[in-house]
Image (cartoon, helix red, strand yellow):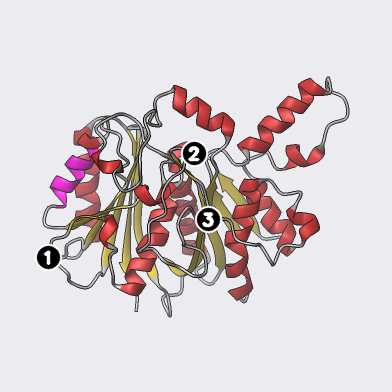
Amino acid sequence: MLYIHQSTCISAQQTFLDVDINTLHEAVDNKLKVIEPTYESIPPGILRRMGKVVRIGIGAALPLIRQATSLDGFIIGTANGGMEDCIKFLNQIIQYEEGVLTPGSFVQSTPNAIAGQLGLFTKNKGYNITHVHRGLAFENAIIDAIMLLTDHPGNNYLLGAVDEISAYNYNIEMLSGWYKKEPATCKELYQTNSIGSIAGESAVAFLINGDQANAVAQIVAVDHIHTSDISIIENQLKYLLQHYLLAGEKIDILLSGENGDNRLLKYYAAIENITADTTVARFKHMTGEYATASAFAVWLACELFQTQHIPAHIVKNQTSEKSIKNILIYNNYKGAQHSFILLKKEN
């Protein structure tokens, strides 16, 4: 069993430390860039050498590390890691004709830079791994954590996900048609009848273990699939609900990854049809589209469990105002990678 005890999130919304999810911050130039904190816990000499993705990843993790009595490792999911630093390093190879290059950009350009820097920064020699599976990177990190806690239920781990909007990646995704060409606002994202979404980024961290006591939420199940066949996705969800919900139990909230791309609406409509009579909420107008956006959804689910309040701007369809005991997250990345994460409230 995987239980979440603490969580932090650095995103384009007010989600870090002084949390306010009722106020919606708008995108700028169709990009939802993170609101970076002051990073008081990171020495300035180290901070100025950090690339953005490493900076926000460590910034999100440190408050949890300070609260943990012990940590047995770090499990991070990311699609690209420090892509901006990677491009800087490649440009230096050309600029200096493969001569004397700056090592900092190279060190922070690899996807495992975040988990590696966390281990070095905290002098932690425990389990340290990064999952790089595009739109399923965070889901695979969860599965890894569940397997570890099955064997070592007394251990504590930091589970997280981080991705940034790099100029290189943004341009590639724009040319591929995954971002909107016309101006789009967060408030009207779901009313746009066009292809693409708005770009996003975030760093999310969770303190997890196998102990139910004082936990905020339990990740009951996680499932993912590569397909474009709607019937296969529907059958996968039906199996998950039959296998993990008690007889007569229903989902309280479907937290949907709908992102304003009209090509993907058919998938979300099919999922909503299976979970009829369930409150439907959406989150990508808060965080934008990126490979590990489902990590933000898990953080948001933990907030909903604790506050028992659903902000009006995330609600698509509210069937009742009963207490929130379980939440199903459905995320779709580029119409090919689909994932389900089922959470239950603890305490």
Point out the frontmost of discs 1 and 2: 2
Residue 334 spot, x, y in % from top left: 37, 33
Please give the label number shown on residue 133.
2
Give the structural element (helix, strand or loop) at label 3.
strand
In magenta stretch: residue 25: no
Q: Which residues are magenta?
A: 267-275
Q: Which residue is mark 3?
A: 160
Give the image quarter of residue 266: top left
Which class describes the residues within 10 Å of circle 3: few (<14), some (14-19), or many (20+)?
many
Residue 1 visible in the shown view: no
Give the image quarter of residue 103: top right
Q: Is residue 115 above or below residue 16?
A: above
Which quadrant holds the C terminus? bottom left
Q: Amino acid at mark 3?
A: Gly
Mark before the other along the chain sequence, 2 or 3: 2
Residue pictured at 49% horizontal, 38% vertical = 133
Q: Nearer the viewer, residue 346 or 281?
A: 281
Q: Which residue is mark 1?
A: 248
Mainly helix, strand or loop, the magenta region?
helix
Mark before the other along the chain sequence, 1 or 2: 2
Q: Is residue 222 above or below residue 110?
A: below
Query: Residues at badges 1 and 2 in contact (C-beta under 8 Å)?
Result: no
Which quadrant holds the N terminus? bottom left
Left or right for 14, reference 325: right
In magenta stretch: residue 269: yes
Residue 91 spot, x, y in % from top left: 73, 26
Compute the Cα span from label 1 to label 2: 35 Å
Give the image quarter of residue 185: top left
Query: Residues at badges 3 and 1 in contact (C-beta under 8 Å)?
Result: no
